Image: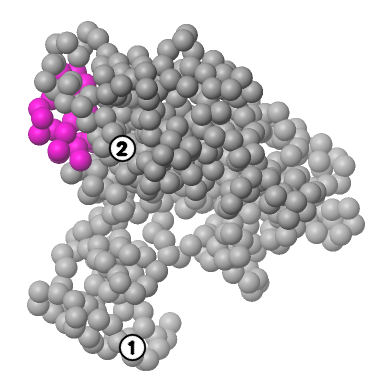
Amino acid sequence: MASEKKLFKVTIDNITIDVETGTSILNAARMIGGDVVPPAMCYYTKLQGSGGKCRTCLVEVTAGQQPIRGQCRNW
Amino acid sequence: MKWSFLAKPEGVPRYLVCNADESEPGTFKDRYLMELLPHLLIEGLIVSSYALGSSRTYIYIRGEYAWIVDILEQAIAEAKANNWLGKNILGTGFDCEIYVQRGAGAYICGEETALLESLEGKRGNPRIKPPFPAVKGLWDCPTVVNNVETLAAIVPIINMGGEEYAKIGIGKSTGTKLISACGNINKPGVYEIDMTISVEEFLYSDDYCGGIANGKKLKACIPGGSSVPILPANLLLKTAKGETRMMTYESLADGGFATGSMMGSGGFIVLDEDQCVVRHTLTLARFYRHESCGQCSPCREGTGWMEKILKNIEYGKGKLTDIDLLWDVQRRIEGNTICPLGDAAAWPVAAAIRHFRDEFEWHVLNPDESQRRNYGLAHYADPLQTVTA
């Protein structure tokens, strides 16, 4: 599946970076690094369909559909 | 509605699924609708399938309604015999088959994505949304899941015309609603109301519930099935602003959860003065713990803890800090779960503590006495003033 190389801006805790479409919020936060990264438990990159179940990584989204999103599964 | 979200056809089949898994405590309207008027539902399904382009429609029915499956299957056979189902219905070129699928006793399968998982043959664990069923539903095809009452209401809407139907009721609460009234009332049963009557009329008039049984007084009521907040009598009959509360979506929700409740599933449960709110909340907590699917930690752990703490309070082993702990637990479940069962488990506990905190404290402070008698109407400063009609 060819992923689009289009970049768009995402702001997490007032820090803005460019990410590709399809990047989950968790991975975007990890790209920023440091204090911004939330804890995550059930997300395992190698297992397809993992993540989103334990609800450890929930964040608040201020401009989007749902106010609380599981980071490891939503993008 | 949900139908407008349905993805445009692109070579994948679309499905209509009727949610007949009516497991919400206090709700039994769909049962009687299907038992007594199966053809109303079938007709609604055929019309809806035609509108949505679904040629395979499923009725997912609660496993406990075993005899209703036979009734529905017979109705489907009758419809087929009259060429209202099957291939080339009435010469229109539209094919439709309705299949009835029994559930196996899980409340969680009333949640639409868990229902789809169960229909696909997997464990009834809710899916993470998005994607929503209208985009990726049954076998990843666009699917619409609707309740029995909604689909049966399609028939009068089409027969009367949408605008005529919308004239019944007030404000945004249009059309008729089925309310299954139960609890300590004189005439429990399913009532079809136009949403112009007040709660007081619904409760006390002989046309409807006929008042509280055995001459008792009203203590509390849950207007919409066990998941919605419980309301004490004074807030039930009048809103916090002093207006009469009507049986409409807006009026029942007036005041948010601080002083209001929700229409919910229309399961109107009435508690009289001899009922113990703590025991009632414990029963519900036990239900939700049992029915939690276990996928996400807030619900799985939270419902377990709520039941444990409530058991302690009810049986005289509670501490005052337990009440605050209960509040804290429910606060952390709400909104943090994959599906609304977590919210449904948290809201009754929140409402019970919010409105009946003194009863909880009485249980904690008087462990022996609370085993022997009820708290009664001591919650109300002036019971005669606030609770009798």
Q: Is residue A57 above or below residue B285?
A: below
In the picture of the structure, the residue carrying the numbered disc 1 is A8
Q: Nearer the viewer, residue B48 or B89?
A: B48
- Foreground disc of the pair 1, 2: 2
Question: Crowding near pointer 2: few (<14 within 10 Å), some, many (20+)?
Answer: many
Q: Which amino acid lies under the numbered mark 1 shown in the image of this protein?
A: Phe
Question: Crowding near pointer 1: few (<14 within 10 Å), some, many (20+)?
Answer: few
Question: Which chain hosts label 1?
Answer: A
Q: Is residue B310 magenta?
A: yes
Which residue appears farthest toward the right when viewing the image? B91
* Secondary structure category for the residue under label 1: strand
Question: Which chain hosts label 2?
Answer: B
Specify whether B238 is left or right of A60.
right
Residue B340 is at least partly visible in this image: yes
Quarter that holds the N terminus of chain B: bottom right
Residue B288, horizontal then vertical, whole percent: 34, 35
Q: Which residues are magenta?
A: B304-327
Specify whether B86 is left or right of B57.
right
Residue B313, horizontal then vertical, whole percent: 18, 24
Determine the CA span between mark 1 and mark 2.
43 Å
Q: Which mark is residue B201?
A: none
* Residue B369 position by quadrant: top left
In the picture of the structure, the residue carrying the numbered disc 2 is B351
Specify whether B334 is left or right of B28.
left
Residue B169, horizontal then vertical, whole percent: 64, 45
Specify whether B278 is left or right of B270.
left
